[in-house]
């Protein structure tokens, strides 16, 4: 049975729907309100509060900490200053992705890594011969995301001692909320302006209360996983076990992916220090990845045509769908759409997909399977740039 | 003419019944002869005490081949497997290790001891999936004869070689380790929590005369893991109505296909003429004729008792004399007036519907084995417990319970005295051990049935009381089971076949030997 997170008393009081999902063994609200769209729009238009405590969290410290992190992740740690955050995948020896997450450089030789799956053993074993300590801080550290265009104002009202205007995208700062010490990172899973707070679990409820109080005038609302899933699809952000499988849980070769196949080539640094999987990725870079991660847009006219044939208006799910759909070019199966969504803000049917690289050029037309009244049909789908939604305030530095 | 059949199957255990059902399904006129009043061999349910039904011997099922369930329509004939999903290992200090159906709960529980182990447990499951997948192929094929130059055998060997090359280097190395290591050594490469290693390694010793540190025991681990893949997920289960219900469903299927089944019919001898099987004679003198006679009994009975050793090659007789059927396990079945409390986790929660393993440390089991090596039963034995009545309430009167305790070690041969003299002392040792974990157990016991390897041998005929009809050691597997050259269900006597657990792929309620033998017999055809 899933167990409560450090914020559960607060989340439970607000969760009108009693809709919960098991996220890594924790109770996570799917939707607080009967219509999750209010939560979605809170993030796109005001601010939302999301309990992301079920993420796995590790701290790596010791004289060789940076060498260990370099060994694990595909990016170059020497390019990461203290106070900076990196998004990165990490791989096995064959260059297949195990997991992805963020690395925060808290001190020269102290890092915090988030992961979707348990990773202590992998991180510790990767440190063979190095003088480091890897600690699992998943349970002691609660995590709360505050996301949306007003998130800065709400958070600034609570954090008096730091100037959030000067905290750039993917950077971290130590701060105090009243007497409560916490780390704030300008990161998130929504593609909007936003921050994540890393707090000792015993202070979690107080931080929630203070933010909700401060956010009342800004339209701050608690946001569940249904809305979060929509936001991250618009932001073009991957979800493990949905858009790709970890090599650890894959049963057959074709279920594994390299970073290049996940659109994460930009996060692979083959010039810097050696890391696990580098040799394999050097080869793959030369050969080219056989598959690519792309965005798809399904023209509304196509949906109208298919549904219209049955005398129906287009029916699209109000939530992001995680049931993968096959993609075709003519009779050839060329990949699959793994996350689909009718984007409320873009008013478009969009999808994240893995396709054969030959068909991954922007503007390429594919066909996607759409089921209309139990019948399988095909609609066009155009390969598009990711992210679908990328507001200027996401990365902007005000007064910086 | 009434006594004439196409095939006679000696022994109504589950493999004999599977064999009969497959032959009858092919249109053969088939007779099954079972010495006891009840069908099933080691897979029987008996109401030993009024109101209390016991899966007297074999008590759980995981390996029953899915193709048998389909081919023989066992679901239609009454088979229902209820889930058995958790294992709890109570520890002497009052703590426990729990592994259940919820992977996150299992993760949290193992994390209390070691987060590394909690993580490794998932990866271990994944690795074993690949191992089982690699070996599953072997379970489904007739073992080739590696010494034969016959094109058919060479082709089969070639296929086998290709198969092993196809499973990938990394998996091949793991497989070699499994084939050669002890279960404790193998598991200690994965885990640091000793009671977890102990409990997992227990799967490597069940039914064998090996300790967790004996090389070769790792393979038995895999043998027990085999049911985990294959369409029939949630592999470990408990048959509704007890293990006998599995045998009943197979018997029903066989009858529906036209097979005739007789109980209380003890076969004395195989009848032959010029090196060919012609039928059998019962102890009461009745004769039945058939050109095909299939023995589902163990090799000692098949070759040395039913058949006349004079008709067999001397080499084979020697191999069978040397075939290891040394029994190492006992069973204690208890009828209880109510559910006893597990001190480590009181109450009747989900953990009481799963396995409870008395395996607090590797040393504990190894010490239990030490005593057995020198001819004593373990005073502190490894015990695998289930409460069948918690899974299927019809096994006991309402509110009352049956408790099944599989116990190791109970060596067939005692150094001093014999099992008739020591049976109850053994039962006491088991109950005393149980009382350390279930403090109230003694007051709850209404009836107790203690079975030593002797009792297993006497009641259902398994030589040495070995539950697998012969040790599952590497020297007795695949093309060595039961003897080199005679692995293909045939015997030197034409028309005389073997189909018990002593032939490939071995023991457990798999039905696979019965089925593979039937396929071979059908291929050879009627004469």
Image (spheres, grey):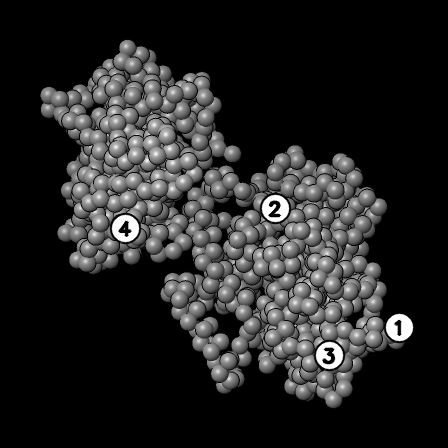
Q: Earlier in the sequence, mark 2 or mark 3?
A: 2
Residue furthest left in the image:
A399
Q: In front of the other: label 2 or label 3?
A: 3
**Relative side of B265 to B500, left or right:** right
Real-space Cα separation, disc 1 to disc 4, in angstroms: 75 Å
- Does residue B232 appear in this view? yes
Residue B84: give its label: 2
- Say which chain tag 1 marks: B
Task: Check contact, mark 2 vs mark 1: CB within 8 A.
Answer: no
Q: Which residue is mark 1?
A: B284
Tell which of A62 and A334 is nearer to you. A334
- Residue pictured at 28% horizontal, 25% vertical: A344
Label 4 Cα neighbours within 10 Å, binned few <14 / some 14-19 / many ≥20:
few
Q: In front of the other: label 4 or label 2?
A: 4
**Relative side of A246 to B177, left or right:** left
| Residue B167 figure quarter | bottom left
Q: Which residue is mark 4?
A: A330
Q: In front of the other: label 3 or label 1?
A: 3
- Residue pictured at 64% horizontal, 55% vertical: B73
Tell which of B192 and A382 is nearer to you. A382
Query: Can marks 3 and 1 be said to lie on one chain?
Result: yes
Question: Tag 4, which secondary structure?
Answer: loop
Q: Which residue is mark 3?
A: B291
- Does residue B192 appear in this view? no
Q: Which of the image's four quarters has the C terminus of chain A?
A: top left
Label 3 Cα neighbours within 10 Å, binned few <14 / some 14-19 / many ≥20:
many
Q: In front of the other: label 1 or label 4?
A: 4
- Say which chain tag 3 marks: B
Query: Can marks 1 and 4 be said to lie on one chain?
Result: no
Q: Position of residue B405 (x, y in %)?
A: 70, 51
Q: Earlier in the sequence, mark 2 or mark 1?
A: 2
């Amino acid at each position: 049975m899933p167990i409560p997170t450090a914020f559960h008393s607060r989340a439970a009081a607000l969760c009108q729907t009693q809709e919960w999902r098991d996220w890594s063994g924790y109770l996570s609200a799917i939707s607080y309100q009967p219509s999750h769209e209010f939560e979605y729009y809170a993030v796109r238009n005001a601010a939302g509060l999301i309990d992301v405590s079920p993420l796995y969290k590790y701290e790596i410290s010791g004289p060789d900490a940076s060498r260990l992190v370099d060994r694990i992740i595909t990016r170059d740690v020497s390019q990461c200053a203290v106070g900076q955050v990196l998004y990165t995948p990490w791989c096995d020896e064959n260059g297949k992705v195990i997991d992805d997450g963020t690395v925060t450089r808290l001190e020269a030789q102290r890092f915090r890594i988030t992961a979707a799956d348990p990773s202590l053993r992998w991180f510790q074993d990767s440190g063979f011969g190095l003088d480091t300590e890897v600690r699992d801080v998943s349970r002691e550290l609660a995590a709360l995301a505050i996301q949306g265009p007003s998130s800065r104002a709400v958070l600034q009202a609570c954090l008096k001692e730091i100037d959030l205007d000067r905290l750039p995208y993917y950077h971290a700062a130590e701060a105090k909320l009243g007497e409560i010490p916490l780390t704030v990172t300008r990161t998130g899973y929504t593609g909007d302006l936003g921050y994540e707070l890393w707090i000792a679990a015993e202070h979690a409820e107080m931080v929630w209360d203070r933010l909700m109080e401060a956010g009342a005038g800004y339209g701050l609302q608690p946001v569940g996983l249904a809305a979060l899933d929509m936001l991250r699809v618009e932001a073009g952000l991957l979800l493990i076990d949905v858009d790709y499988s970890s090599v650890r849980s894959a049963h057959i070769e074709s279920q594994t992916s390299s970073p290049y196949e996940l659109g994460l080539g930009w996060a692979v640094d083959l010039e810097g220090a050696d890391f696990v999987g580098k040799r394999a990725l050097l080869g793959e870079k030369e050969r080219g990845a056989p598959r690519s991660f792309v965005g798809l847009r399904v023209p509304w006219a196509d949906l109208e045509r298919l549904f219209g044939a049955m005398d129906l208006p287009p029916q699209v799910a109000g939530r992001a769908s995680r049931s993968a759909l096959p993609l075709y070019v003519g009779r050839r199966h060329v990949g699959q759409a793994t996350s689909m969504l009718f984007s409320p803000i873009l008013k478009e049917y969009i999808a994240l997909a893995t396709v054969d690289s030959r068909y991954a050029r922007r503007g390429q037309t594919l066909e996607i399977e759409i089921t209309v009244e139990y019948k399988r049909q095909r609609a066009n789908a155009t390969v598009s740039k990711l992210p679908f939604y990328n507001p200027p305030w996401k990365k902007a530095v005000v007064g910086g | 003419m009434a006594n004439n059949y196409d095939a006679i199957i000696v022994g109504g255990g589950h493999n004999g019944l599977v064999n009969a059902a497959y032959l009858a399904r092919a249109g053969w006129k088939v007779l099954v002869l079972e010495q006891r009043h009840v069908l099933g061999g080691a897979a029987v349910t008996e109401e030993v005490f009024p109101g209390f039904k016991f899966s007297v011997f074999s008590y759980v099922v995981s390996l029953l081949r899915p193709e048998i369930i389909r081919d023989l329509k066992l679901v239609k004939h009454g088979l229902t497997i209820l889930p058995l999903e958790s294992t709890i290992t109570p520890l002497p200090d009052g703590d426990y290790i729990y592994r259940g159906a919820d992977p996150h709960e299992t993760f949290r529980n193992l994390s209390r001891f070691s987060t590394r182990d909690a993580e490794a447990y998932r990866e271990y499951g994944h690795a074993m999936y690949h191992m089982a997948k690699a070996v599953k192929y072997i379970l489904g094929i007739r073992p080739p004869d590696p010494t034969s130059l016959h094109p058919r055998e060479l082709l089969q060997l070639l296929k086998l070689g290709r198969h092993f090359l196809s499973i990938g280097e990394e998996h091949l190395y793991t497989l070699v380790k499994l084939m050669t290591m002890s279960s404790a050594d193998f598991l200690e490469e994965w885990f640091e929590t000793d009671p977890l290693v102990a409990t997992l390694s227990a799967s490597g010793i069940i039914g064998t005369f090996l300790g967790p540190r004996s090389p070769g025991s790792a393979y038995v681990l895999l043998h027990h893991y085999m049911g985990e893949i294959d369409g029939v997920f949630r592999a470990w289960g408990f048959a509704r109505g007890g293990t006998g219900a599995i045998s009943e469903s197979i018997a029903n299927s066989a009858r529906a296909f036209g097979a005739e089944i007789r109980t209380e019919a003890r076969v004395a001898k195989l009848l032959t003429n010029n090196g060919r099987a012609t039928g059998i004679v019962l102890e009461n003198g009745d004769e039945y004729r058939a050109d095909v006679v299939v023995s589902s009994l163990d090799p000692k009975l098949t070759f040395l008792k039913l058949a006349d050793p004079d008709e067999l090659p001397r080499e084979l007789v020697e191999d069978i004399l040397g075939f290891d059927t040394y029994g190492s396990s006992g069973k204690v079945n208890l009828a209880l007036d109510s559910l006893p409390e597990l001190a480590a986790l009181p109450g009747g929660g989900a953990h009481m519907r799963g396995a409870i393993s008395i395996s607090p440390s590797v040393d504990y089991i190894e010490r239990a084995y030490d005593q057995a090596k020198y001819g004593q039963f373990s005073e502190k034995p490894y015990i695998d417990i289930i409460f069948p009545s918690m899974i299927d309430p019809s096994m006991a009167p309402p509110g009352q319970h049956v408790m099944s305790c599989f116990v190791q070690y109970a060596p067939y041969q005692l150094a001093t005295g014999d099992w008739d003299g020591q049976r109850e002392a053994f039962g006491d040792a088991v109950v005393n051990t149980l009382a350390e974990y279930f403090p109230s157990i003694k007051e709850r016991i209404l009836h107790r049935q203690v079975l030593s390897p002797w009792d297993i041998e006497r009641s259902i005929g398994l030589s040495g009381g070995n539950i697998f009809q012969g040790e599952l050691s590497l020297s007795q597997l695949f093309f060595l089971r039961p003897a080199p050259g005679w692995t293909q269900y045939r015997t030197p006597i034409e028309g005389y076949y073997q189909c018990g657990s002593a032939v490939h792929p071995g023991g457990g309620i798999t039905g696979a030997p019965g089925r593979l033998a039937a396929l071979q017999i059908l291929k050879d055809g009627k004469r």
